[in-house]
Amino acid sequence: MREDEHDDRFEAAARLAEVDPVQGADQYWEVRLGNDGKPQSMSAPADIPVAAWNNGSNGNPEFAVSSDGRLAAVTTATGAIMVLSLVTSATRSWTIPSGDGYATGLSWAGDRYVAFQFVSRSGDRDAGGVRVLDTRSAATAALAASRLVISSEGKLAGGISGVFNPVITPDGSKILAAAWTGFNVAELAEFSARTGQLLAVLIPAESMPGHGSPCQVLWTDLSGAHLIAYCGTAGVVNGTRFTPVDLHLPDTSGTVFSGLLW
């Protein structure tokens, strides 16, 4: 995105951030940005159920916010994927038995579909990979309510052996993910959300790009034409060019931000 270009959703987006107060448990806050991209205010913590505060794997919640800011999807300590309204606090959950595996890397397409990476712990490895959950499905199990888009089994096109940090575009057309192409070698790739086919390589394969951490997409516009990614440092991706940018994180006076989302 050139400096003279403007995207209203990029500039006026609200962030829902996970915050670790010095005094106690994690809370969720909304940080609103001005037209200059800098924080203008922080609202009171969102009413997130306690069950959604820990995913049981690393102690930090997995969560994603829909592009309209009205819905959040989170993983719970019991292994479920929970969707909750940030307007009414109503919730609905889809179960994942702990022996089967766990979900990570949640992201939204519109206000209906939630993409996630399912890491299988069972003998059925065919279920593992990037899946898309239909929140209007009558099924109550996450695997039954979702379809597999990118399998974690076998070699993928382009010599890719696995993907991680997946993000679905808001229009539901593409999935962006870091992709392994060799030992400690990864690229940032674009896949079809319908077929799982590799569409493009956005950042060529490097030895663990970004100071030892593969690239993580933080935000994408509607179709994936413009991205914000973290590759050791935050930046904007246009085509195959990564340009570092300052996200202007606020002075939080000792409060630690993690899991910051647009």
Image: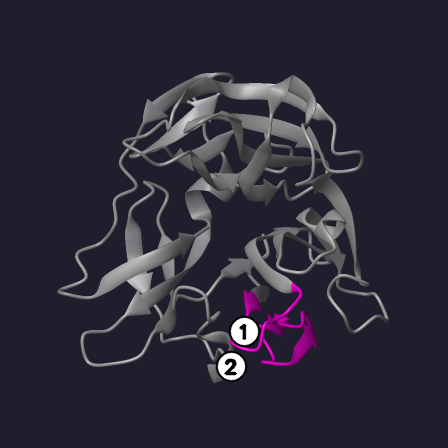
The one of 241 and 34 positioned closer to us in this rendering: 241
- Say which residue appears at 54% left-offset and 73% top-offset: 76
Q: Residues within 10 Å of mark 1 (few under 14, many from 20)?
A: many
Report which residue position mark 1 lands on: 76
The quarter holding residue 237 reads top left
- Say which residue appears at 38% left-offset and 69% top-offset: 59
| Location of residue 100 in the rendering, given as x and y in whole percent from the top left corner | 67, 65
| Location of residue 149 in the rendering, given as x and y in whole percent from the top left corner | 75, 42
The amino acid marked with disc number 1 is Thr
Mark number, residue 51: 2
In the rendered structure, the answer to whether residue 41 lies left or right of residue 178 reads left
- Say which residue appears at 67% left-offset and 30% top-offset: 191
Is residue 98 within the magenta segment?
Answer: yes
N-term mark: 1 or 2: 2
The residue range painted magenta reads 74-100
The one of 63 and 116 positioned closer to us in this rendering: 116
The Cα–Cα distance between marks 1 and 2, rounded to whole angstroms, is: 6 Å
- Colour option used: one colour
The answer to whether residue 3 shows anywhere in this view is: no
- Say which residue appears at 32% left-offset and 40% top-offset: 36
SS category of the residue bearing label 2 = helix
Asked if marks 1 and 2 touch (Cβ < 8 Å), the reply is yes
The one of 156 and 46 positioned closer to us in this rendering: 156
